[in-house]
Structure formats: structure tokens, C-alpha cells
Amino acid sequence: MARHPRWTLSQVTELFEKPLLELLFEAQQIHRQHFDPQQVQVSTLLSIKTGACPEDCKYCPQSSRYKTGLEVERLMEVEQVLDSARKAKNAGSTRFCMGAAWKNPHERDMPYLEQIIQDVKAMGLETCMTLGMLNESQAQRLANAGLDYYNHNLDTSPEFYGNIITTRTYQERLDTLEKVREAGIKVCSGGIVGLGETVNDRAGLLLQLANLPTPPESVPINMLVKVKGTPLADNDDMDAFDFIRTIAVARIMMPTSYVRLSAGREQMNEQTQAMCFMAGANSIFYGCKLLTTPNPAADKDLQLFRKLGLNPQQTRVLAGDNEQQQRLEQTLMTPDTDDYYNAAAL
């Protein structure tokens, strides 16, 4: 049984229909009740296995079904992953996220995954993985290894989902989230906007997320990055105000969740990102790539943080080691950005 008020579609639709400035005011008030508005959680994302995915997600350049020119890369060696994690920590990251282009992990890969979770955590970093669907045994093994977060996005509303993906069902995604939660791992789940969906579909996505028995601790909101060769390469650009509105509604509906600006930030100007932070976004990925898509270049994030007076959030990690937090704060105060951005180079 849900331990929090359940939203109805009509309630969510009413939020989307509010005047934008009124909506932003409400979202900012709720945000301030639960978070420091000047704090932003910062993560690093690494692709540990790139391309040749059997799924048919129409937005994704990693699908083997589309000719996007993406270079396929085998599963990274453990030491390569750990080297990237060390660089991330040295640059100030507090969470290290690892993604593999699989429909689901094979049993033969589980010892490898367990090892890198343990080794990354031993550095004093939070760990997150996105590996596709999980069964109960796999979820429990990842939990026993110490995994902090598991990412598995719902992508869009149940009604629009079949237009984007046919190789796994919406229910299978929900089932994976349930297995992750039951194993004791924190949930990271969000979606993508700009797929060609309607406002009602955006409302439907947020309704699904907010009405989970426990809402996700982290909710990434991605703006479609159009990649040549994918079926959505010629989609119309999403209006920036519509994206900001989606962030605000997510904040109101999930007041204690971290709302992350994820893919698509490279396409946003500073003003749009600033309004997203005003709307309640309080988490970002930094680095030159998000798996295979571009992320803001070196000085842009640093300049924006300084202009807006934003600071990296302090996060309690293994053994209380907040040395990486201090390094990130120092990076934000100095012009040398090499370490800050090389940490996530893929």
C-alpha cells in the first residue's frame, strides 16, 4: 500500500495548465521545504559497455538496429573502470554511475559487476548502475555487493510507450523497479521528453513515477538528443518553457526526490538551465559525455555555478570520506577545469 498521497491524472493536468510563473513559484516553495536551493548533487556517468544493444528504443544511438556510426566497445576491464572512478573522485564527484548497453545482464557478468561495485565503494564513492532489466537474484546480488542506486527509466507514459519501444514492456520496467526496491537499493527512474509525446503523456509519466509505492529517490528528466540514424532524428525541437514546466511539475509531485537535469543540457542555454534550477532541479551529471551523447563543455558548468551561486552538495559516503566534496568545491573556485571534466571522459 502506498505510504504517500496518490496523484490523479486530473490533478497533474491542472499543474501543467497553471500559468508558468505561478507554477515555478509553487515548485520553488516546495523545493525549499526539503532542500537547500543553492545545493546541487553532482554525479559522473561512465559507459562500461557501449553499443550493440538488442533493444529498439527509437531515441537511442546504442541500438544495434540503427546505423548511427557509433563505435561498439566491449565491456571495459575492471582497472579501466576504477581508473575513471579515481579521476571522478579526484575531481570531486560523490557518486559514480556505470551504464551498460544490455537488455539485461548475463549471469556470467555478475561477478564482474559485484567486483566493481565493491572496489568503487572502497574509494568512498556512492555507486549507481543502469544495466537493463534485472531478476530478483541479480538485484539481490547487486545489493549485497553494496550498490547504492539503480537506474531504470520508464521513458514515457504507458499510452505512448509502444510508439518508442517494442522489445520490452512497460510492466517489465515496473517489475524491475519493484525488484530493485525489494532488494534494498535506492531507485533512480525518470524519462525523456521531446519524443513526440503530448502534454498528457508527460503527465502520465510523472503520474507513474510519483504513484510508485515509494517514489524514486532520483528522477532524471532527459530532453531528447536527436541522433542521425535513429528514427527520432528529425523530431521537432521541444520548447524550453515546456521542459521547464515538466521539471516544476516533477518537483511538486515528488517533493523529496532529487530531480536531475540529465541528457539535453548541451542544447540548453544558461537561462533555460537557471530556470530549471528555479523550478526545482537539484542534480546534474558533469563531464563531456553522458554515455554516448554530448554534455556541456569544460567552462560552461563552472561559469553557470558561479553566476547562480550554486554549490555542490555535500554527501555522506563510505567511511565519512568527504575529501572529494572539498575537491569539487575547490575546482568551482579556480579556473583550472581539466580535472573537473576529464573525470567523465569515455
Image (cartoon, grey):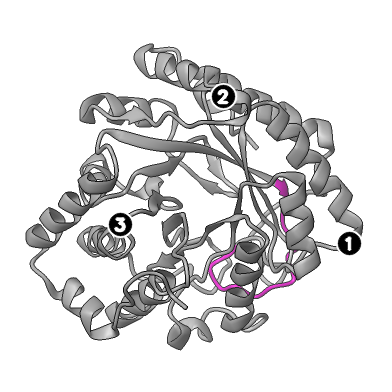
Furthest-right residue in this view: 108
* Residue 174 location, quadrant: bottom right
Image quadrant occupied by the C terminus: top right
Contact, mark 1 vs mark 2 (Cβ under 8 Å): no
Q: Position of residue 259 (x, y in %)?
A: 37, 52
The residue depicted at 73 percent of the width and 27 percent of the height is 83
- What whole-number distance in Å separates the C-alpha atoms at marks 1 and 2? 33 Å
Q: Position of residue 79 (x, y in %)?
A: 82, 30
- In the rendered structure, find residue 107 and report the number of the disc placed on it: 1
The residue depicted at 25 percent of the width and 64 percent of the height is 249
Along the polypeptide, which appears first: circle 1 or circle 3? Answer: 1
Q: Amino acid at mark 1?
A: Glu
Q: Which residue is tagged 2?
A: 320
Along the polypeptide, which appears first: circle 1 or circle 2? Answer: 1
Whether 265 is drawn above or below 163: the answer is above
- In the rendered structure, find residue 255 and report the number of the disc placed on it: 3
Label 2, secondary structure: give it.
helix
Whether 116 is drawn above or below 158: the answer is above
- What whole-number distance in Å separates the C-alpha atoms at marks 3 and 2? 26 Å
Contact, mark 3 vs mark 2 (Cβ under 8 Å): no
Along the polypeptide, which appears first: circle 3 or circle 2? Answer: 3
Whether 260 is drawn above or below 209: the answer is above
- Is 328 in front, or is 181? 181
Label 3, secondary structure: give it.
loop
Chain part drawn in magenta: 48-60
Q: Position of residue 11 (x, y in %)?
A: 22, 79
- What whole-number distance in Å separates the C-alpha atoms at marks 1 and 3? 37 Å
Can residue 272 be spotted in the picture? no
Mark 2 packing: few (<14 Cα in 10 Å), some, or many (20+)?
Answer: few
Q: Amino acid at mark 3?
A: Pro
Q: Is residue 57 magenta?
A: yes
Q: Is residue 240 magenta?
A: no
